[in-house]
Amino acid sequence: MNINDNEAIRDARQLGRGRMTLLGLQHLFAMFGATVLVPMITGLSMSATLLFAGVGTLIFHLVTRFRVPAFLGSSFAFIGGYAAVVAMGAESGLSAAASLPYACIGVFCAGILYFILAALFAAFGSKKVMRFFPPVVTGPIIIAIGLTLSSSALNSCSSNWWIALAAVVAIIACNIFGKGMIRIIPIIIGVLASYMLALIFQACGSNVIDFEPVRQAAWIGLPFKMENTAFAVFKDPNWGLVLSAILTIVPISLATMVEHIGDMCAISSTVGEDFIENPGLQRTLVGDGLATAIASLFGAPANTTYGENTGVLNITRVFDPRVIRIAAYFAIILSFCPKFAALVSTMPAATVGGVSLILYGMIAAVGVRNIVENKVDFSDDRNVIVAALILVLAVGIAYGPGSLQIGSVKLSGIAVSAIVGIALNALLSIKRAK
């Protein structure tokens, strides 16, 4: 059977095990570039990231009754939260490695918030709940996340602008001129192109890649160490930093939950089934939140549904969730190979910077698209004030004092802007209703 036929294939078993395996590898390939980039930027465990991308996907499928063909990979939205908590930890005399478990506690609480929203959807319906998170609030928050991350991308690029530029050019070329699968995997192609240039520089005598960790790494090992997990915090906790991490990171989940709803709409449209109603947003939110909460406990990044894999569904027209689960199994297997993780970690900082430059800009652009597609009326002074305060607080605090301290608690710019934006929008909506 030709898998490129326009007719959708909803049971991939008819293709045979060989083709199903190849389709699963394709989904792994599609998610891989973005998923491994998050631990490279944040300093989290590469192996744990792969393990809980696979485990999180399987949990999501179990919760959603094996109906939704979605892959869960690392979320970029929380990168700013990790960076903010690491900066707060540094002020308390903690290293980045010692601060990241505190950030993981914040991400765990963010995952739990998914359960609360799912319960509200089940109890009151989507329309009543979503009025507290309109596009005039979520759009600027998403824009602010991208803008506040931009400086870290530029700092990484500055280590070697030629290597960074190779990644940027390759990603743009794939997006604009690529066809088929090339257009679906621009990130990984950008990484490979940049890495190839780095290898050329290495051969010419420039020391841009250190292969020693690869030589020292074992072929088989555990994906995480307990001292890098959220559990390590409770040996000698800094409760002020715990609370700061929670208040900094939890508001970010407001944007990711809205993103999740958009992803479910996109997958439903691609597959031709209404997953919003069956299995329902309450189940998909619980699946995503549970995957994120469990991953964070073991030192892995927050999870989110991946648009790259939705693109693969659209190209292949193979909508069987079994194929996605094959990709999850492969991710789990690779997580037990430290040598593979070490090889990925040899990526030059400039490569990460070049890719991040595009990705952070895309995060901001998604926020702009959210505002435009929902036709937010900026001739309305109320909308202008809400959006303006969100943007100026997030960016101003990030590039000014770095955080806002209230007592022993420190709040990042994103946290402050999200809290102010949601509260102000609700207050002004009540006033308008009167």
Image: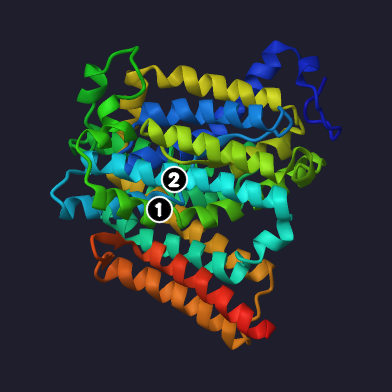
Q: Give coordinates of residue 258: x percent, y percent.
A: 60, 55
Marks 1 and 2: in contact by CB < 8 Å? yes
Q: For mark 1, does the 10 Å Cα neighbourhood hold few (<14), some (14 to 19), or many (20 or more) residues?
A: many
Which numbered dot is residue 3? none
Given the image, on which type of amino acid does mark 1 rest? Ile
Most distant residue in the left direction: 93
Residue at 23% from the left image edge and 24% from the top image edge:
213
Q: Which residue is mark 2?
A: 109
Residue 189 seen by the camera: no
- Return the x and y of residue 347 as percentages of the image width and height: 32, 36
| Image quarter of the N terminus | top right
Report the mark closest to the observer, 2 or 1.
2
Would you identify the image quadrant in which residue 378 lies? bottom right
Residue drawn where x is 65% and y is 84% of the image: 432
Is residue 423 found left or right of 409 in the rendered image?
right
Location of mark 1 (residue) = 249
User: 275 above or below 394?
Assistant: above
